[in-house]
Image: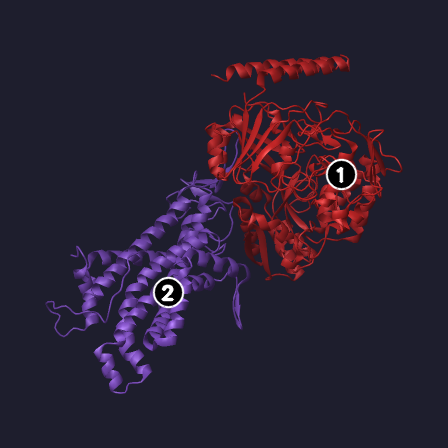
């Protein structure tokens, strides 16, 4: 019953917000803003403080925001670092909206879409007390290349001077590409060609603004000062990561970097997922990064239903098939696999229909350019209904690949392994001699990408970086993403269809001028890629968060998932 | 396991009606009189027969393919058709749970695993693999160890020095660490030595790995036995009579170390089965979709909360089989060398 007062306060505030929202339609914007601010202040007064206890099985690698590429830390960077622009810290689709962050404005590019001039806000300080200057911004962009950020060759390769930086990272200057003007307090970024997605790329953590004197190498376990509401106070990868309030933080944009509720956020490492779930049930911890084990889902959904949050993701699970290696260098063989897979079975392995939705195509529902399409089902059309084994076997026979050996490669965790074993069963049922090859999660991603390992088919997941169709279609199936012999070849299927690739490149340019028209074209490209079957899409997953009883105000951003600092614990 | 060294041919103690009987006959009689050991033989026979009948059970009784995922399948419980993978209906409806034991031999007797496969059928098939690996590896270990022990002990000198140091090197590694290292390498790439090639998923790989890592375990006592026999009068006499080396080894030494190896054999089966289970549990033993008791425990690990029988059933099977083999091994030792039992403190 100790929860009652909190719930009543929350209910009162929610009612106040609802009333404010209703009033907002007729009232002046300033009035709405002030009401929301007052409500927010009331919530802050009621709930500010305490320690939020997060859990993960293991640390997520380097803490450097310009190097780390894991959800584990990208989620925490939302409260610790800022870019020139940022994704709105709000629930649902609003999170896809890019807003000014360190920059005071969202500029309209000039010079044919190639010149972006950002006005830098004054008065923002890093957690070490130093003020953010245009020089810090320039140094941060140079640092992306100096530390060999995983996206330096893709997201930021279009900046003038980037080519030289990619060749010689240590001496990167981005000359003519990123220019500071200390008088006007602006930073100008010049691109080689117009880029409709540039605003997203400067809003992700790899483009975080860090002090100019940050080490020109991966900072590893040593935290780099940031501008967010919190800073990383200490990090021991074998024990815990501690975030504390940034003493120099003053909220400059609620949409870009809101103040947080807890005084401290601690992420501890080492417990098994089972133990983490038990700790949350017992109120000893507040959240786990890990997906709950299948055998705990029932208990969580029934006994702890109020503590479970399920959100659809713009992501997909898929099985890339190597289009340059037998038997999947044969279109009919690839299509056969698509027809044979029982997507409902795959969904069951993932945890059931409440946690995933069957799919046949690349773009997930609700994503720009998505239009329902499923040719690989008993009744081809827009939705998957059932596998067509007869057709699959016939296609295998026609392809002349029956009886060939196929190895299914996957991570050796519970769900991925089960998915791989299921695929093995499917492949055997349509005439192949399939084996499985489970690989440690630490090695799997790079192993699957390198053509030298001759991976025929594997189990993969792709989660959006930002809300653009190209982030799925062009990144995963574009010729430019295929680098034979490299560990960094995200086009794992090795799919390179010149005709489709030209369409994708044209569409990227079209998106600069007319995003809506480009999205119509992306839907057509999605169909073409699906028809060519370089992958077998399995399903679109949903995200499940299990929090302790005391966690309130759970806000799920579609871009960066749970906004940890926007929840309260008291 | 206790160190068990038995010397010489089956010892002969005076017993009523034993006049004229060979030591082997006497040993057999003593073993048959050991009720505990014979009970364990019965248990082993039941397990072996049940495992050999796996295809019969799977195809003609349970009507299921234990190597194929059956996530959308159904079965019959109390006359009603029910899904094998059952979606949660209460609360938020999260999760899918495989059907539990029905205790009906025709329909998922022990329930299903996370792929919707019949656990009972897989348990029998898994038992076949575990037993095949255990017996084959133990046989291979005993053969290799006997050869190494005979050669090292008989020839002595530099030959003994080299072989003994090799055994020391292998034995210096923790057994599981060595087995895991070999398995990790060989199961990814297979094994190719000249024209001889073992594929990554072949059962011969875990058999070979387990057999090799335990060779010193048997070879060292055999070598000690041979060193002792080499000094015995009957061997000296044979040498004096001009017997060839081959004849000495084959006719005089080998028969006298056979009992040691025979005593080790059931114990090695037990140890090898445990090792196989451990390797399979770590995903580096028997490869899916094939099953062994170790892989089934691994399959059941993710279902411990909801369907513990998936992990418990193979666990119990391993425990019972290993217990039976150990007790039988002790029985054989007692039968072959009753003096050892009488010598043992507190011996009956």
Q: Are marks 2 and 1 in contact (CB under 8 Å)?
A: no
Q: Which chain contains the residue that carries disc 1?
A: A
- The residue drawn where x is 63% and y is 30% is A231
The answer to whether A87 is drawn above or below residue A402 in the figure is above
Image quarter of residue B324? bottom left
Q: Which chain contains the residue that carries disc 2?
A: B
The answer to whether A328 is drawn above or below residue A414 in the figure is below
Marking on residue A465: none
Tell me where residue A310 appears, x and y as whole percent: 58, 31
- The residue drawn where x is 64% and y is 26% is A246
Circle 1 is placed at which residue position?
A: A139
User: In the drawing, does residue B162 fall left or right of residue A480?
Assistant: left
Q: Is residue A13 visible?
A: yes
Check the rendered structure and report the hue given to chain B. Answer: purple
Check the image and name the residue furthest to the left: B16
- The residue drawn where x is 65% and y is 59% is A452
Check the image and name the residue furthest to the right: A111
User: In the drawing, does residue B270 fall left or right of residue A78?
Assistant: left
Q: Nearer the viewer, residue B202 or A341?
A: B202
Tell me where residue B126 appears, x and y as whole percent: 42, 55
Tell me where residue A508 appears, x and y as whole percent: 81, 42
Circle 2 is placed at which residue position?
A: B216
User: In the drawing, does residue A506 fall left or right of residue B6?
Assistant: right
User: In the drawing, does residue A96 fall left or right of residue B101?
Assistant: right
Circle 2: element type: helix
Tell me where residue A513 appears, x and y as whole percent: 85, 36
Circle 1: element type: helix
Q: Which chain is red?
A: A
């Amino acid at each position: 019953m100790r929860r009652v007062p909190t719930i009543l306060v929350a209910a009162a505030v929610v009612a106040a917000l609802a009333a404010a929202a209703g009033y907002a339609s007729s009232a002046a914007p300033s009035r709405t803003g002030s009401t929301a601010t007052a409500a927010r202040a009331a919530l802050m007064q009621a709930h500010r403080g305490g320690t939020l206890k997060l859990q993960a099985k293991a640390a997520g690698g380097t803490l450097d925001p310009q190097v780390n590429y894991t959800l584990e830390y990208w989620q925490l960077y939302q409260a610790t670092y800022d870019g020139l622009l940022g994704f709105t810290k709000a629930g649902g689709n609003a999170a896809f909206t890019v807003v000014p962050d360190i920059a005071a404005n969202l500029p309209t590019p000039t010079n044919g879409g190639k010149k972006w001039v950002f006005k830098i806000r004054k008065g923002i300080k890093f957690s070490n007390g130093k003020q953010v200057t245009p020089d810090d911004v320039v140094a941060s962009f140079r640092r992306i290349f100096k530390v060999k950020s995983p996206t330096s060759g893709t997201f930021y390769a279009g900046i003038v001077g980037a080519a030289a930086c990619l060749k010689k990272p240590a001496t990167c200057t981005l000359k003519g590409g990123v220019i500071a003007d200390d008088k006007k307090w602006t930073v100008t970024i010049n691109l080689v060609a117009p880029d409709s997605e540039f605003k997203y790329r400067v809003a992700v953590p790899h483009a975080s603004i860090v002090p100019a004197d940050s080490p020109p190498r991966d900072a590893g376990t040593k935290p780099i000062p940031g501008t967010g509401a919190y800073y990383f106070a200490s990090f021991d990868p074998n024990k815990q990561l501690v975030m504390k309030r940034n003493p120099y933080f003053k909220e400059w944009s609620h949409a870009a970097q809101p103040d947080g509720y807890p005084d401290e956020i601690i992420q501890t490492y080492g417990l098994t997922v089972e133990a983490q779930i038990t700790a949350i049930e017992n109120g000893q911890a507040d959240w786990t990064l890990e997906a709950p084990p299948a055998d705990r889902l029932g208990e969580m959904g029934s006994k702890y239903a109020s503590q479970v949050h399920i959100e659809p993701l713009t992501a997909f699970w898929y099985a890339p098939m190597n289009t340059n290696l037998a038997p999947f260098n044969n279109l009919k063989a690839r299509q056969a696999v698509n027809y044979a897979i029982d997507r409902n079975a795959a969904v069951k392995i993932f945890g059931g229909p409440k946690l995933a939705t069957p799919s046949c195509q690349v773009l997930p529902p609700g994503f720009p350019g998505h239009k329902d399409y499923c040719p690989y089902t008993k009744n081809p059309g827009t939705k998957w209904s059932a596998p067509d084994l007869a057709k699959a076997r016939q296609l295998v026979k026609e392809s002349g690949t029956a009886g060939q050996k196929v190895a299914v490669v996957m991570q050796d965790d519970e769900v991925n392994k089960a998915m791989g074993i299921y695929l093995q069963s499917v492949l055997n049922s349509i005439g192949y001699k399939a084996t499985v090859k489970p690989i440690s999660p630490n090695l799997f991603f790079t192993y699957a990408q390198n053509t030298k390992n001759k991976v025929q088919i594997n189990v993969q997941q792709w989660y959006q970086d930002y809300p653009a169709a190209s982030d799925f279609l062009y990144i995963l199936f574009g010729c430019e993403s295929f680098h034979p012999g490299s560990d960094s070849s995200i086009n794992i299927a090795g799919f390179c269809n010149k005709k489709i690739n030209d369409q994708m490149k044209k569409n990227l340019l079209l998106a600069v001028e007319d995003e809506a028209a480009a999205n119509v074209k992306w839907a057509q490209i999605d169909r073409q890629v699906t028809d060519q079957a370089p992958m077998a899409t399995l399903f679109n997953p949903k995200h499940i968060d299990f929090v302790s009883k005391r966690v309130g105000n759970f806000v799920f951003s579609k871009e960066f998932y749970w906004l940890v600092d926007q929840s309260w614990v008291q | 396991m206790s160190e068990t060294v038995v010397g010489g041919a089956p010892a002969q103690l005076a017993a009523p009606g034993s006049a004229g009987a060979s030591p082997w006959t006497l040993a057999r009689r003593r073993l048959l009189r050991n009720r505990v050991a014979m009970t364990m033989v019965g248990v082993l026979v039941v397990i072996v027969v049940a495992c050999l009948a796996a295809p019969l059970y799977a195809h003609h009784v349970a009507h299921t393919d234990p190597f194929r995922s059956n996530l959308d399948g159904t079965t019959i419980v109390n006359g009603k058709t029910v899904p094998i993978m059952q979606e949660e209906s209460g609360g938020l409806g999260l999760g899918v749970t495989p059907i539990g034991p029905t205790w009906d031999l025709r329909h998922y007797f022990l329930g299903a695993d996370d792929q919707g496969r019949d656990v009972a059928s897989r348990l029998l098939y898994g038992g076949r693999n575990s037993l095949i690996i255990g017996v084959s590896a133990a046989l291979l270990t005993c053969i290799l160890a006997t050869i190494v022990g005979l050669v090292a002990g008989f020839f002595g000198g530099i030959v003994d020095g080299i072989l003994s140091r090799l055994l020391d090197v292998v034995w210096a590694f923790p057994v599981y660490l060595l087995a895991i290292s070999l398995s990790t390498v060989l199961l990814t790439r297979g094994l190719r030595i000249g024209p001889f090639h073992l594929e990554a998923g072949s059962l011969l790989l875990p058999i070979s790995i387990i057999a090799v890592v335990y060779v010193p375990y048997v070879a060292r006592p055999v070598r000690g036995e041979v060193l002792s026999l080499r000094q015995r009068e009957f061997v000296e006499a044979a040498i004096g009579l001009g017997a060839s080396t081959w004849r000495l080894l084959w006719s005089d030494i080998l028969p006298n170390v056979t009992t040691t190896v025979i005593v080790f054999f059931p114990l090695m089966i037990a140890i090898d089965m445990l090792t196989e289970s451990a390797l399979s549990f770590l995903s580096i033993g028997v490869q899916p979709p094939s099953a062994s008791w170790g892989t089934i425990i691994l399959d059941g690990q993710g279902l411990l909360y909801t369907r513990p029988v998936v992990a418990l059933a193979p666990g119990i099977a391993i425990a019972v089989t290993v217990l039976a083999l150990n007790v039988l091994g002790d029985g054989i030792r007692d039968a072959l060398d009753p003096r050892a039992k009488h010598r043992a403190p507190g011996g009956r």
